[in-house]
Image (tube, rainbow, N blue to C red):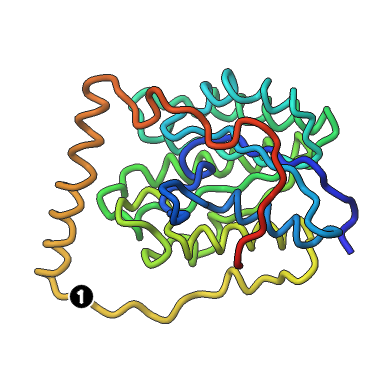
Amino acid sequence: MIPRTYRRYVAIGDSTTEGLDDPDGRGGYRGWADRFAEHVARAQFGGVVEYANLAIRGRTTARIRAEQLQPALDLRPDLATVVAGMNDILRKSFDLAAVARDIHAMQHALVAQGATVLTFTLPDPAPVMPMARPLRGRVLALNDEIRKVTADSGAILLDLGAYPVASDPRLWGDDRLHANGAGHERIGAALAYTLGLPGFDDSWAAELPPLSVRRRHQVVAAELAWVRRHMLPWAGRHLLGRSSGDNRECKRPALAPVVLLDP
């Protein structure tokens, strides 16, 4: 049995909470938040859980706080997830202290209203995206701050970044910025285990078999293809001051019953 019954789950954040890159087969995205909501529903008396997902791709932590926190509070969740920071890390203007303050403020506000709040640290990007190695220091620094503010706010931490499997390229999508379906499945299971839902254990953290060694020309070809398909379009958008989340709305703005899909 879980220690309390959850009736209203609200997720706030950016593209990872929205569910990229885990297609739902209907033109949208499923993602770890949807999967976690299903796990909570299955654990409770006939699956009676309402779920809203206010996340929008491309959002910085400051915008998540400004645009999503109050709507989340208005929904009166008893369970919430707050995941943010990667879009800040990718910007020249990255302000570690400001990001940490915003994450703490969001966690604290939801906890103070009575919600159980979960979050997680970010995986090391270097094994997934070698060209992102210069950003590794920022990720590690932000993870340290997430650990500190979560301990202070009373939220619950899944220290995902501490597990090597979180950075296994086979759990990431083609753009190397978002988990694939298998990666989102693991995160959803990890959150369920962290919350103490019955039927979950630490098997989500099991490492995959060793990667086969690729020849140098295969590595070079893959890197060039990734630059062409993903890095250059991203850089072009940001040079023009645009975001992938421009003119987008969240996928679940209101609480609605969770529809149980196949695990």
Q: Which residue lies furthest to the left in this view?
A: 217
- Name the quadrant of the C terminus: bottom right
Instruction: Check the image and report above or below for 199 versus 111.
Output: below
Give whichever of 105, 260 is nearer the camera.
260
Q: In which quarter of the image is residue 45?
A: bottom right
Q: Quadrant of residue 202?
A: bottom right
Q: Residue furthest front?
A: 26
Instruction: Check the image and report above or below for 189 versus 150.
Output: below
Q: How crowded is mark 1: few (under 14 residues within 10 Å), some or many (20 or more)?
A: few
Q: Mark 1 points at which residue?
A: 214
Residue under the point 72% across and 69% down: 200
Give whichever of 129, 236 is nearer the camera.
236
User: Residue 138, percent across and down?
Assistant: 43, 39
Residue under the point 44% across and 56% down: 25
In the picture, measured across the screen, residue 90 lies left or right of residue 65, that is left
In the picture, measured across the screen, residue 66 lies left or right of residue 172, that is right
Give whichever of 71, 235 is nearer the camera.
71
User: Residue 110, percent across and down?
Assistant: 76, 30
Residue under the point 36% across and 35% down: 90
User: Residue 260, percent across and down?
Assistant: 66, 59
Residue under the point 20% across and 37% down: 233
User: Residue 24, percent across and down?
Assistant: 47, 54
In the picture, measured across the screen, residue 34 lies left or right of residue 135, that is right
Q: Is mark 1 on a helix, strand or loop?
A: loop
The kind of residue tagged 1 is: Arg
- Name the quadrant of the N terminus: bottom right
Number of marks: 1
